[in-house]
Image: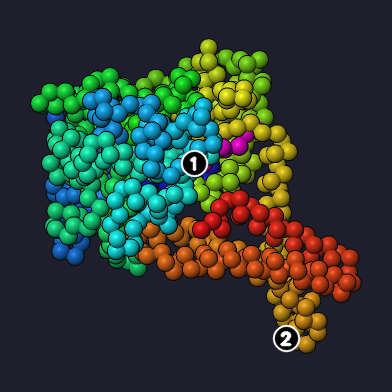
């Protein structure tokens, strides 16, 4: 899933700024008409090898465009039409949340209902349950603290079709809160897998039929569905990746649970749904849900920054995105072979949605920027936010080091927290966040009464300085949560990790030299030789396991089975354990045989490096079954 979560988290804020700047620097002129827009999109689709695209553009009163570009089926040369169904990935969450809100408005569910009360059969663990229970609103807003699933659970590769409760078994190890629920936003597909089951339990209907009758039908989405199983009828677009100078079909693989990413929808479906949003949820048959509930769907309430008044972030399956200085709401989505957007601005009375059936992130960003600039070109650009004088006294306690403390990544969360560590310093006209691994951002004061700041490239202030439940300084940027730490806490783990990796990389050279020497007969002591190559073998195993991690995502997005990758990852991570233990044992056995003091020190440092990294992997769940 394309999440913050896809998921793509390298210096999130800085990268987003870089992509936006690069897109604007290379952006074509704004098209003046829809034919000109579609012509530009088709030209770029050919250049970037995107097979097909469904596109919807609406105003409050008119459907300006609802049709397709390119091919739904490349082999048959079948053009995309307004009725072709595309897989929409995480846009599903928007409609799953609507289903929950409908149950709430009907009085069959409450936003503050405890998960343990409504579904005690779900085996989750929350060490703060007494004072900070997991509730429905937190599931909707991703503030439970549950880990996200990994690419290993993206699809159900078995022949079984478990029910929504049984399917939660695939995510059981992620159902453990990392911090007090309701403190931080942390995107997790597991939250919406749980909501899928709750909708079924409360409504007494299968999830698919409940959404069809109670959500899709009132919204005027006649073709939409959330079927898990593959449908081979011609109304479904095929998914592709561009490989080997040709389009390769991405096989349809079902997910475990429908509510987090299994929506299939057409351009016509989204045209109607967008207009209902622009009309404040009014339909030809009356109001779908109350305007109050619409407002609740767009405004978060549960996590710390939302409670402090910053509500232009992720709400009930409904996220906020700034495009061209204007705030749009909706959701994005990605799933094997597809990338999608569903975005609207009730203030501007405009909305657009598209989905491409070829996994191509560069074209996705190009299309998002181009369409947004096209539909807003006749609307006045929002004014740049006012810059207020910096309150040096109020800011002073917040200066210092910060580390990302809201990652939902199960295997790489700790390493990403090290990567997203910065030092906040005061400069002449504002503040500067300098990341320890490179890159920086400038923040300007955006409020005279609150510690609210704005990024130098953004119009919408989304940086808030707060105090947590223990009265410790925290900084929230959009939905990213940074805790203040000491300089020692900032530098020591990072320095130890980098030093350990450099030492183990050096062992590769030393191991090769040792192997050459034993081949030439200049190394006679077999135990000493094994000591010399064991750290190198540990490093090779570690590199293999690290290499496989991004491949899991690449394979998943291409619809390729991951069983072989799992084998390689297992060989790598358990090989690292084996050769780490071997290095320590051999050093103990050969200690007296090593005559050189510096060589003893080198082997000792290698052993400690292996043990240090192994400890990090153990605490990062690498060896959990």
**Label of residue 220 in the image:** none
Percent of width and height locating residue 366 = 34, 44
Task: Name the one closer to the observer, 512 or 217.
Answer: 217
Above or below — where is 219 with respect to 521?
above
For this orientation, the residue located farthest to the bottom is 521
Task: Name the one closer to the observer, 208 or 297.
Answer: 208
Percent of width and height locating residue 181 = 49, 32
Above or below — where is 290 with respect to 162?
above
Can residue 435 be seen here? The reply is no
Percent of width and height locating residue 509 = 71, 70
- Residue 534's quadrant in the figure? bottom right
Percent of width and height locating residue 211 = 21, 39
Residue at point 59% right, 48% down?
A: 415
Above or below — where is 493 with respect to 153?
above
- Tell me if 592 is positioned left or right of 419 in this view: right
Q: Circle 1 is placed at which residue position?
A: 125
Q: Secondary structure at mark 1?
A: loop
Question: How many numbered badges does the structure rendering display?
Answer: 2
- Tell me if 127 is positioned left or right of 227 in this view: right
N-term-proximal mark, 2 vs 1: 1
Task: Check disc 2: other Cα within 10 Å, few if <14, some if 14-19, many if 20+.
Answer: few
Q: Secondary structure at mark 2?
A: helix
Q: CA distance from mark 2 to mark 1?
A: 55 Å
Task: Name the one closer to the observer, 183 or 315.
Answer: 183
State the extent of the magenta-drawn residues as a range: 401-408
Residue at point 53% right, 12% down?
A: 448
Residue at point 73% right, 68% down?
A: 583
Residue at point 26% right, 24% down?
A: 107
For this orientation, the residue located farthest to the top is 449
- Residue 593's quadrant in the figure? bottom right
**Label of residue 519 in the image:** 2
- Tell me if 104 is positioned left or right of 624 in this view: left
């Amino acid at each position: 899933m394309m999440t913050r979560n896809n998921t793509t988290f390298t210096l999130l804020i800085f990268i987003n700024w870089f992509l936006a700047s690069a897109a604007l620097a290379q952006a074509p002129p704004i098209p003046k008409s829809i034919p000109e827009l579609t012509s530009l999109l088709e030209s770029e689709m050919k250049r970037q090898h995107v097979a097909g695209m469904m596109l919807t553009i609406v105003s409050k009163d008119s459907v300006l465009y609802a049709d397709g570009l390119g091919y739904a089926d490349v082999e048959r040369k079948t053009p995309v039409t307004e009725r072709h169904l595309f897989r929409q990935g995480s846009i599903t969450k928007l409609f799953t949340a609507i289903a929950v809100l409908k149950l709430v408005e009907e009085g069959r569910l409450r936003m503050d209902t405890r998960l343990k009360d409504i579904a005690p059969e779900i085996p989750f663990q929350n060490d703060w349950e007494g004072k900070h229970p997991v509730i429905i609103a937190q599931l909707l807003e991703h503030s439970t603290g549950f880990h996200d699933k990994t690419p290993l659970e993206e699809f159900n590769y078995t022949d079984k079709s478990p029910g929504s409760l049984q399917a939660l078994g695939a995510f059981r190890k992620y159902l453990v809160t990392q911090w007090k629920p309701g403190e931080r936003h942390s995107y997790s597909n597991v939250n919406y897998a749980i909501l899928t089951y709750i909708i079924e339990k409360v409504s007494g209907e299968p999830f698919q039929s409940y959404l069809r009758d109670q959500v899709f039908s009132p919204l005027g989405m006649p073709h939409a569905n959330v079927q898990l199983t593959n449908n081979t009828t011609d109304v479904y677009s095929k998914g592709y990746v561009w490989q080997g100078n040709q389009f390769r079909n991405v096989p349809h693989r079902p997910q475990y649970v429908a509510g987090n990413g299994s929506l299939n929808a057409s351009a016509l479906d989204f045209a109607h749904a967008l207009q209902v949003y622009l009309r404040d949820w009014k339909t030809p048959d009356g109001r779908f849900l109350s305007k109050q509930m619409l407002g609740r769907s767009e405004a978060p309430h549960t996590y710390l920054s939302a409670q402090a008044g910053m509500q232009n972030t992720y709400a009930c399956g409904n996220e906020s995105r700034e495009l061209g200085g204007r705030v749009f709401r909706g959701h994005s989505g990605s799933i094997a072979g597809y990338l999608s957007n569903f975005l609207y601005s009730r203030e501007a009375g405009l909305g657009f949605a598209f989905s491409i059936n070829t996994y191509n992130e560069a074209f996705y960003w190009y299309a998002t920027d181009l369409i947004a600039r096209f539909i807003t070109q006749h609307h006045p650009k929002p004014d740049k936010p006012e810059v207020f004088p910096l309150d040096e006294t109020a800011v002073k306690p917040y200066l210092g080091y910060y580390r990302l403390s809201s990652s939902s990544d199960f295997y790489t969360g700790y390493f990403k927290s090290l990567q997203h560590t910065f030092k906040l310093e005061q400069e002449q006209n504002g503040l500067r966040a300098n990341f320890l691994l490179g890159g920086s951002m400038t923040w300007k004061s955006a409020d005279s009464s609150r510690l609210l700041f704005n990024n130098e490239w953004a119009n919408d202030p989304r940086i808030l300085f707060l105090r947590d439940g223990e009265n410790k300084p925290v900084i929230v940027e959009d939905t990213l949560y940074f805790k203040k730490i000491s300089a020692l806490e900032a530098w020591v783990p990072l320095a130890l990790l980098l030093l350990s990796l450099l030492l183990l990389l050096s062992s590769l050279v030393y191991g090769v030299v040792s192997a050459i020497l034993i081949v030439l007969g200049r190394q006679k002591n077999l135990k000493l030789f094994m000591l010399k190559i064991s750290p190198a073998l540990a490093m090779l195993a570690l590199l293999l396991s690290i290499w496989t991690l991004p491949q899991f995502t690449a394979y998943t997005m291409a619809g390729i089975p991951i069983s072989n990758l799992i084998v390689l990852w297992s060989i790598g991570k358990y090989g690292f354990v084996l050769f780490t233990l071997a290095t320590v044992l051999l050093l103990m056995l050969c200690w007296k045989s090593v005559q050189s003091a510096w060589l003893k020190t080198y082997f000792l440092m290698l052993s400690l490096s292996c043990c240090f990294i192994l400890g990090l992997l153990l605490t990062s769940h690498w060896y959990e079954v």
